Image (cartoon, rainbow, N blue to C red):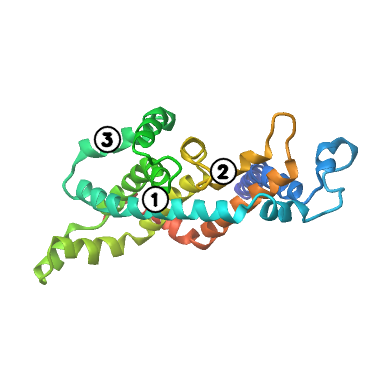
Amino acid sequence: MSKKTKDILKSVGTHVLIYAVLLITLFPILWMVLASIEPQQSIINQNAHGLLEFDATLRNYISIFTEYDFLKYTKNSLIVAFIAVALSLVIGLPCAYAIARFKMRKSSVIVLLVRMIPGISFLLPWFSIFSQLGLRNTYTALILSHMLVALPYIVWIMIPNFESIPVDLEEAACIDGTNRYGAFFRIALRLTTPGMITASLLAFIFSWNNFMFSIVLTGRNTVTLPVAIYDFVSYAYVDWGGLMAASCAITLPIVVLALLLQKYIISGLTAGAVKG
């Protein structure tokens, strides 16, 4: 077999594999989108028609915003996610910088261990503490609980990003008259912007999709989107159309945000791979 033939077969095999993985990945999303514009009866009786044979309707989308007050739940999720990520950045960036610059390996291991602990193990302590403090059904309880995971995310991702910045750049800035804080804000943060965007997006996605903490700590006024989806499921009935429409409404902002920030995400994830 000639080298050219081998290259052609290799290229064909690679493309087949890529398209197969893509199909497996996108099929659930395709089904979700189709089900969101499909009447409930058609979803239940899938065997009576093909996947694409149904009368499309926007009733499911209209229902989630008129009958289920999804705008309120969206507002709650945005408030919790943005504040949790912002506070995690304020605390996590200096922490990651200190660990990277002063070689605090034990501290980095502790951060990793905190991230590895199952979140469900914190539910009972959080519930007990916030109940005694009168903070249940408040944004404060949700924000603090979401920071429990968002903060280690940000610290762990930013450590290699700060390590990839040559110390000589900060030393040169100090010689020119700035101090350690000035070097951090003017040099380190500016050069690690892709990493910050990546860490922020991952932390935001976690908070946006979090169900476990939210279902325990939310109340009537602080219900977030993942908890609101649970309203479509009852003991004897599942509103599949509304459930899929709500899932699409929750997924779309994250997909759009990821596509807009795609180039920053890629560079942010690989920034610490090679030290400068």
Q: Classify 10 Å Cα crowding around label 2: few (below 14), some (14-19), many (20 and above).
A: many
Across and down, in percent, residue 256 comes to 57, 59
Residue with the mark numbered 3: 109
Across and down, in percent, residue 74 comes to 55, 54
Q: Nearer the viewer, residue 177 or 12?
A: 177
Across and down, in percent, residue 63 comes to 72, 52
Asked if residue 27 shows in the view, the reply is: no
**Amino acid at dot 1:** Ala
Please, what secondary structure does the residue beneath circle 2 have?
Answer: helix
Please, what secondary structure does the residue beneath circle 3 have?
Answer: helix
Quadrant where the N terminus sits is top right
Q: Which residue does the image show at 26% across and 49% down from the upper left?
A: 96
**Amino acid at dot 3:** Val
Q: Nearer the viewer, residue 3 or 178?
A: 178
N-term mark: 3 or 2: 3
- Mark seen at residue 226: 2
Q: Which residue does the image show at 28% across and 61% down from the upper left?
A: 189
Q: Which residue does the image show at 52% across and 63% down from the upper left?
A: 260
Q: Which residue does the image show at 30% across and 65% down from the upper left?
A: 190
Tell me: 143 left or right of 63. Answer: left
User: How much space separates mark 3 and mark 1, taking CA atoms?
Assistant: 23 Å
User: How much space separates mark 3 and mark 2, taking CA atoms?
Assistant: 31 Å
The mark closer to the camera, 3 or 2, is: 2
Asked if 35 appears above or below 258 in the picture, the reply is above
Residue with the mark numbered 1: 84
Q: Classify 10 Å Cα crowding around label 3: few (below 14), some (14-19), many (20 and above).
A: few
Count of all numbered marks drawn on residues in the image: 3
Asked if residue 257 shows in the view, the reply is: yes
Please, what secondary structure does the residue beneath circle 1 have?
Answer: helix
